[in-house]
Amino acid sequence: MGTEAPSPTKMSGEGLFCCHIFEPWRFAGAEEGQKNASNIEEMKGKKMRKAAITLTVSAAMILSLTGVSGKAQAAVLVDFLQEKGVEVDISATIDVYDKYVWRGFRLDGDTVMQPGITISAAGFEAGFWGSWDLESHDVLSSDEVDGWIGYAFDLGFIVEDFEMIGISIGNTWYDFPEGSTYSKEMYLGISLDTLLSPYFTWYHDYGDEENGGADGNYYHFGIGHSLTRVEEYGISLDAGYELGLNDEAFIEGDGGYSLFTLGLTVPLSETLTMAPSIGYSVPFGDLEDSADGNQKEEFYGGVSLAYSF
């Protein structure tokens, strides 16, 4: 599941939303027993066709947004709202990672492509995000299409000194086409505009377990920092740490993970940036327990392209 509330350590490879079947530990524990040559060969044709479709759709999404026609359509919408005194930001991303790791779960060990689009105005934000695996080296499948809406504001309206305190609330809808499963999740976050940009976010998955929901909670604590290393080109070094606690969400007990991230942000133009990054996820508690979550340490990497209007 790939869509998270904004945070200083967000990496698309770490996922916006959730898992394909919503019970990733069952796949992780049984993967070796299920994977055999006949199954893999049987899936290859389908996966190759799907990969081609995914590349086409993703490219079309980005090109439609960044091309002349897409720019013109976006400009019309932006100009209309700006005439009404509303500042609008539209951005599109397309990421490729060597695996899909989300909140300590390995949802896919194959290379994934993850396109997304976000529109924000007057504190509100809405968007769509997807993830598709491009290979068939394991039996996991993380195909996913998500949508979300949220609102963010600071507390400066109470006391001016409280401007450094940010609040975010919202809801995410998860859909997993191949498994015909879906879920929904609300979130509430708080962040501080100060040294290391600390943040805390509570996520509550209130989806029906029979349909693929978790009916559980996640608690995320994190910090992050960026340092401009090449002033002339605006290239920055970005590092972050996140501690995630899991309260019976797709596991029977309690557990969590530590996530370390490191990357670069490289401006390619005034509107286009490239961000290669790596992540290291370490599960603990029942998330790591072979009788429950059965997750292991994961190292992954990839690159993100972001275009803003």
Image: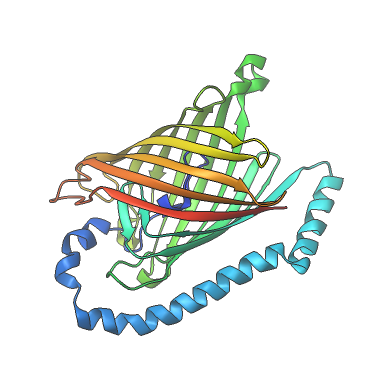
Query: Which colour style is shown?
Result: rainbow
Residue 71 is situated, as x and y percent measured from the top left of the image, at 76, 61
Q: Quadrant of residue 216?
A: top left
Q: Nearer the viewer, residue 99 or 161?
A: 99
Residue at coordinates 79% horizontally, 52% vertically from top-left?
Answer: 78
> 218 above or below 61?
above
Q: Nearer the viewer, residue 235 or 305?
A: 235
Residue at coordinates 33% horizontally, 48% vertically from top-left?
Answer: 215
Q: Nearer the viewer, residue 204 or 230?
A: 230
Residue 298 is situated, as x and y percent measured from the top left of the image, at 29, 50
Is 240 left or right of 23, judged from the image as shown?
right
Location of the N terminus by quadrant is bottom left
Residue 31 appears in the figure: yes
> 283 above or below 305?
above
Q: Residue furthest right?
A: 83
Q: Nearer the viewer, residue 222 or 210?
A: 222
Q: Quadrant of residue 64?
A: bottom right
Residue 159 appears in the figure: no
Residue at coordinates 29% horizontally, 84% vertically from top-left?
Answer: 42
Residue 84 is situated, as x and y percent measured from the top left of the image, at 84, 45
Is 20 left or right of 2, judged from the image as shown?
left
> 273 above or below 232?
below
Is 129 left or right of 121, judged from the image as shown?
left
Residue at coordinates 30% horizontally, 66% vertically from top-left?
Answer: 140
